[in-house]
Amino acid sequence: MVKHTVGRVQVGMRGRQGGLTSTALFNLYINELIEALGGARVGCSINGHCMNSISYADDMVLLSPSVGALRRLLSICERYAESHGLRYNVKKVNCSSLSQQRKNRLMCHQ
């Protein structure tokens, strides 16, 4: 919610959750975080493309080849949240570890 104070009256603006504009506005807002994550230069190579995050609406998945790299990505997210007044919903946080036996299908790098 964006708040502006005019004299003693506080005016708030909020897009309705699930509204047509809420996803587009969130994407504009979160784009800076996605760029910062891309600058970390760590991620998983999927079909020749290095990826470290997948986002849809207000959900994000971090992809990391190691625990250390994941900590680095989480640190970037934490700094972004602090500087932009965001809070993550820890009830929706999950961590999974995947292993791929066949070469060239999923290769992670750091």
Image: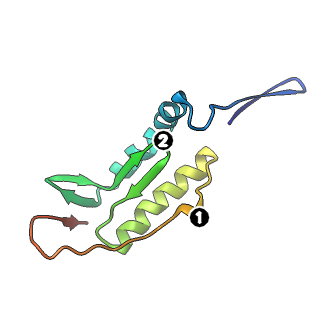
Q: Residue at x 9, y 70 (%)?
A: 103
On the picture, is 56 further left or further right than 88? Answer: left
Decide if residue 99 is on the left or right side of residue 22.
left
Mark 1 sits on what residue?
A: 91
Above-or-below relation of 39 to 68: above
Above or below: residue 82 compared with residue 72: above
- Quarter occupied by residue 72: bottom left
Q: Residues within 10 Å of mark 1 (few under 14, many from 20)?
A: few
Horizontal and vertical percent position of residue 45: 20, 58
Instruction: Report whether 11 appears left or right of 78.
Output: right
Q: Which class describes the residues within 10 Å of circle 2: few (<14), some (14-19), or many (20+)?
A: some
Residue in front for this viewpoint, 37 or 44 = 44
Q: Is residue 10 left or right of residue 102?
A: right
Residue 29 versus residue 89: which sits nearer the camera? 89
Residue at 22% x, 66% y: name it.
108
Residue drawn at (29%, 73%) of the image:
98
**Picture quadrant where residue 78 is located:** bottom right
Residue underneath mark 2: 30
Image quadrant holding the N terminus, namely top right
Q: Which residue lies furthest to the right in this view?
A: 8
Amino acid type, residue under disc 1 in the picture: Lys
Q: How far apart are marks 2 and 1 (CA)?
A: 20 Å
Q: Which of marks 2 and 1 is in front?
A: 1
Q: What residue type is labelled 2?
A: Ile
Where is residue 29 shown, x and y percent of the image? 51, 36
Residue occupying the point 43% across, 68% down: 71
Mark 2 or 1, nearer chain start = 2
| Secondary element at tag 1 | helix
